[in-house]
Image (spheres, rainbow, N blue to C red):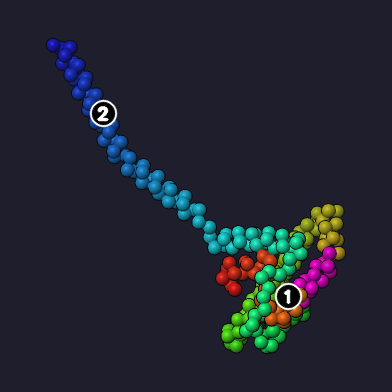
């Protein structure tokens, strides 16, 4: 009889222990699920890039596309004559490019700020494109100048790199003049065209 009571008592304890464990699981499980959901939401939020990151990613992609196009000798994309461009539009577009050889950035900015150009999409297109092109040239020249000044502190190697940059600088300037002159001539023909890499980047950012 005592043995039977002991067995029943042991079974009751086991049932009580199982019940307590199940209640503990039911209490903690929602918290664990919520914690996991919060972590998933946080991880998901981290995957969205910022506008600056998206711009940098787009710039890298378009720079690669531009390099490939230049290796193929492709300087224009989707060139087509704009039938709405009159003589004044063509002249302003030409000036937006060739004046960059003397006074960078000024002419496109004046065109974009003028009230009349708001009604002339051909002028605004080439003003934005020429402004972006020369801004890119200026930015690259600044980066090269700063990088060369830093590397120049390294003995021998820095001096050799500085000498190479100094020798290649006139060639780079001539290439820049050729680029703005060539694109200015194409715009004077009444053409809208894309500069490989650059125009696609401007359209992705909503600037064209």
Residue 25 lies, with reference to residue 154, above or below; the image says above
Dots 1 and 2: beta carbons under 8 Å?
no
Residue at the location (21% across, 19% down)?
A: 10
Residue at the location (69% across, 81% down)?
A: 190
Image-based side of 49 in relation to 68, left or right:
left
* Residue 13 appears in the figure: yes
Q: CA distance from mark 1 to mark 2?
A: 82 Å
Depth check: 156 or 24 in front? 24
Residue at the location (16% across, 14% down)?
A: 4
Image-based side of 110 in relation to 7, left or right:
right
- Mark nearer the N terminus (1 vs 2): 2
* Residue 103 appears in the figure: no
* Location of mark 2 (residue): 18
For numbered disc 1, what is the local secondary structure?
helix
Image quadrant where one finds the N terminus: top left
Label 1 environment density (alpha carbons within 10 Å; few <14, some 14–19, many ≥20): many
Label 2 environment density (alpha carbons within 10 Å; few <14, some 14–19, many ≥20): few
Residue 143, percent from left and from top: 72, 64
For numbered disc 2, what is the local secondary structure?
helix
Image quadrant where one finds the C terminus: bottom right
User: Per the image, is 102 magenta?
Assistant: no
Residue 100 is drawn in which quadrant?
bottom right
Residue 59, percent from left and from top: 63, 62
Residue 75 is drawn in which quadrant?
bottom right
Residue 137 lies, with reference to residue 45, above or below; the image says below
Residue 39 - label: none
* Location of mark 1 (residue): 183
Span colored in magenta: 168-181
Residue 95, percent from left and from top: 72, 83
């Amino acid at each position: 009889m005592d043995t039977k009571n002991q067995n029943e008592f042991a079974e009751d304890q086991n049932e009580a222990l199982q019940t307590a464990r199940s209640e503990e699981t039911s209490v903690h499980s929602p918290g664990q699920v919520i914690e996991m959901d919060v972590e998933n939401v946080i991880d998901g939020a981290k995957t969205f890039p910022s506008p600056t990151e998206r711009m940098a990613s787009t710039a890298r992609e378009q720079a690669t596309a531009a390099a490939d196009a230049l290796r193929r000798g492709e300087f224009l994309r989707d060139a087509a004559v704009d039938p709405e461009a009159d003589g004044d539009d063509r002249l302003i577009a030409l000036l937006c490019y060739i004046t960059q050889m003397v006074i960078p950035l000024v002419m496109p900015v004046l065109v974009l700020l003028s009230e009349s150009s708001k009604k002339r999409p051909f002028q605004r297109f080439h003003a934005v494109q020429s402004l972006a092109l020369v801004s890119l040239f200026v930015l690259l020249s600044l980066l090269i100048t700063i990088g060369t000044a830093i590397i120049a502190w390294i003995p021998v190697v820095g001096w050799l790199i500085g000498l190479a940059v100094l020798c290649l600088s006139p060639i780079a300037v001539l290439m820049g003049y050729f680029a703005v002159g060539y694109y200015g001539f194409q715009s004077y023909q009444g053409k809208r065209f894309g500069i490989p890499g650059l125009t696609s980047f401007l359209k992705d950012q909503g600037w064209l």
